[in-house]
Amino acid sequence: MTGPARYQNRIEILQGTLDLLILQTLARGGQHGHGISLAIRARSGVLSVETGSLYPALHRLEKKGWLDSEWKISENNQRAKYYSLTKAGRKRLTAEKSRWRLLVQAVTGVLDPA
Amino acid sequence: MDALRFVFRRFFKRRQLGRELNDELASHIATETSLRVQEGESPEAARQAALRQFGNVGLVAEVTRDQWGSTWFEQALNDIRYASRAFARTPLFSSIVVITLALGIGSSTTIFSLLNGILLHALPFPESNRLVMLWELTPETRKPNVVNLGNFVAWRERNHSFESMAAFVSLPMNLLSDQGSQQVPGLAVTADFFSTLGTVPLLGRTFRPGEYWTDEPRDVVLSYGAWQHLFGGRADVIGKKISVNVSHREIIGVMPPGFGLPNNKAELYVPQGIVINEGRNYSVIARLRLGVNPGAAKAEMATLAANTAREKVNMDSGWSATAVPLLDQAVGSIRPILLMIFAVVGLVLLLACANVANLLMMRASGRAREISVRLALGASRHRIFCQLMIESLLLALLGGLLGAGLGGIALHLLKSWLPESLRIPRLSEVTLNLPVLLYSATVSVLSALIFGLVPALQSLRRNVTEDLHESTRSVTSGREVRRALVVTEIALALVLISAAGLMVRSLLRLMTVDPGFRAESVLTVRMMLLPVQNEEYRADAVREMLDRIRALPGVVADGSIGILPMEGTNSGTSYYRADRPEPTPNARPGGDVSIITPGYFEAMRIPMIQGRAFNAQDRVGSPLVAILNQSAARMLFPGEDAVGKRVKVQWTNNDVVEVVGIAADIRHSDVSTPPDPCLFMPNDQQPFPFSALVVRTGGDPAQLAKAIREQIRLVDADQGISKIEEMQQMVSDSIARPRLEAAVLTLFGVIALGLASIGLYGLVAFSVAQRVREIGIRVALGASRAGVFRMILGDGLRLTLIGGIVGLAVIIGLARFLHSLLFEIQPLDPLTLISGICLLTSVSLLACYVPARRATKADPAAVLREE
């Protein structure tokens, strides 16, 4: 897996994992879109979230009832739309997490045979 | 729930949501900018960088909006727009479908409005489901019979089922007003009548419940119609007097519009005292106690009657009694025909649906590629299914809308056109009201499901790659379903035309039945004779009227009878031989009794078989005489000569009379009922309170009506007339119902046959169009054109054969029901069934012939060149 040099510190998010990342980020408290993308980048060090993926994902998750949203004033005095996990969202997060762990285990098993 | 709220909010606040999204994205950029400024960039540079980093704002907004999706409602609106455009492009197809559906739904709506108004809708009395009619039941035959007042009193005192009961009798009443004398229908009712029905008067009061009249008060309660007619609806009528049957009565109340018993509409209500005698003359209405069901009341009536039968052996031995819910009583006779017509229009609607389904499937075959392309481009099968169903629904609703309109018009025509002689109860209560419109809407949606579901499911069962493959020309999917639909149509059409054929044959039989008298050129004049002190005067008045009328130019003969043929009978009177020991009460023979004047048989052209007719010498003081009809003579004197024998008749005075003649049998009650035994007695010896003059004329009887009226007025100016009618009309009215049944079935049978043949034609024509290449190849390979013709024709006729067999099976299944509607014709009448099958086969041949001809014209060279 060798890509061009300029992408070395920016890895595309695997399809399907963005939802998990958003849910996990919001599990620590409500946040706006910009904050979520900052948090994911900071926490992972390498993952960058395109706005063209982030906002559709946020709206999709809200439609599914996993997120709630409200307008608040942010720390640097901006009006911003804050997302937070709903009860259903919290459940979903647990389910997604265990699925992800299973996947990682499986892929690792294939890559590094014991 | 959240998702639903989201969907809801999104639909109504779409624009607001758009603004919110823009704000959200702007706040993202603003936040990034302010972060960059905090890190020391210049505001301008920071903003540029933030925008760059964000990417294409419009694109992000758009992909985000896509996530909202569209609601089912928005999709449906889209589908409707799409479908409307599609229909507008194929106006012929759309109008055929909509008109077919409109006919089906319209006829169904019309008949349902009748069904709803007549059979289902409650009667206009408070808690009308608690109202029942009480009848005595005749010994052995157990036919409902009017009631003896003594029994009525016994029931009223002993029962536990009823809150109250009242007796009434329907009488024409002679009303004298500024407009001259006229006889209007009236009811003489016992005191509890109005309180039993529970309707409060519009003005004044009604009779007080519980009153026992020994001397009837001279009161009268007016119907709304009489109030309008006599007083123009003036409010100050209470206390005014009107002349009823030449005595003055005080108006004490006016009933609201629409009040009246369903089969006993009356203009005037007068009090009826309870005078107990031997006669059975009264109808009884009763209100059930709360919680008592009609079944329990019926059982109690049987018990009560068993008690009176033990107590009054002479009067009641063998008799029983029963209770019938008022609504059943009112509509019982019309129910079978209404249900039959309803079933028929239901079948026609199914036929219409089958045709539309067929049309849609053919259209779907043409659209196969469109649907395949959409599937290939990623439309979900669910979406396409919804869209096809919405198209069907749209067609059905358009058809339903048009159908409801047609139904309204048809109903209006029907109400003015249905002959009064059908005596359809409650016809005035029939309207196109909300329940009826709901019914139409439901039927429309259901038919959309029926005709839309199969084609829609068929369309989805496609193999996309195969359809899009260029050489796949003929799409044969759905073929079996379409064939099955056409077979069903043919079967239903055969059922309907056969039923129509049976009805028409039955009607023809009825029309050619010889009633035993000559009705043509006879005018009848019915009246209740004014009550007088001396009974004999009634007979004198009739004699004088007849003498005067006989002197009119154009009158050939005249006479009078108590109750006219086709107008009912004085049935259930006992008469038996006086030269034998008196039979026990429930072994007494009997039959009809008719009170006539000497000229009656001559005027009606009823031949005397033996002995003589009555003459002027048969009057008060001379020996009492009677004439028997052939049936009565056979019943009383089998194998003997009846003339000169003596008979005891349980009539007014229980006289013994001498038989002086035997008259030919006639069909008295109606043309379909064989003659009953009948005993005739002269009006001069047994004066009867009603008279129907029968006047035989040399020309058009209607022209004499005015002159006859004038002669009656000259005899007694106060004497009104209840009805003048031609005898011929009465005979033809008596078969109005079978005529209507035959007409309705023929109409719908023809529609069904038309629909089925269109269906068959469409199927065969379509299959020829699709097989044109195959046929071309066959011809190229040496098949003869005649062979191709036979092949196509045979294909269509095979369907007809299968449909015919299914139809016959249905008719066999319906035989018992059909039997009850037919006169002297068996439901499996071979002539009718064979004619029906022949008709069906000819129409099918015609429907297949045109496309089969076209198939033989296929030019193999031209067809194969197209490849």
Image (tube, coloured by chain):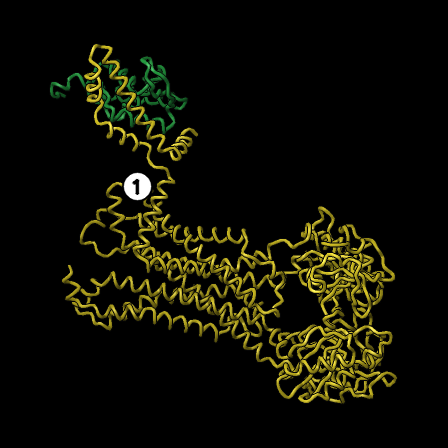
Chain colours: A green, B yellow
Q: Residue at x 72, y 57 (%)?
A: B255
Crowding at dot 1, Cα within 10 Å, few <14 / some 14-19 / many 20+, comes out as few
Q: Does residue B662 show up?
A: no
- Relative horizontal placement of residue B863, taking residue B564 as reference (left or right): left
Residue B784: image x %, image y %?
Answer: 21, 72
Circle 1 residue: B380
Q: Is residue B286 above or below residue B26?
A: below
Image mark 1: chain: B
Q: Quadrant of residue B825?
A: bottom right
- Relative horizontal placement of residue B565, taking residue B149 as reference (left or right): left
- Relative horizontal placement of residue B627, taking residue B519 as reference (left or right): right
Q: Residue at x 80, y 53 (%)?
A: B209
Residue B547: image x %, image y %?
Answer: 76, 86
Q: Residue at x 36, y 29 (%)?
A: A63
Name the quarter where the C terminus of chain B is drawn. Answer: bottom left
Q: Quadrant of residue B808?
A: bottom left
Name the quarter where the N terminus of chain B is drawn. Answer: top left
Residue B859: image x %, image y %?
Answer: 18, 68
Q: Is residue B5 above or below residue B336?
A: above
Name the foreground residue: B841 vs B148.
Answer: B148
Residue B755: image x %, image y %?
Answer: 40, 64
Name the foreground residue: B268 vs B276.
Answer: B268
Label tally: 1
Q: Is residue B305 above or below residue B720?
A: above
Q: Quadrant of residue B609?
A: bottom right
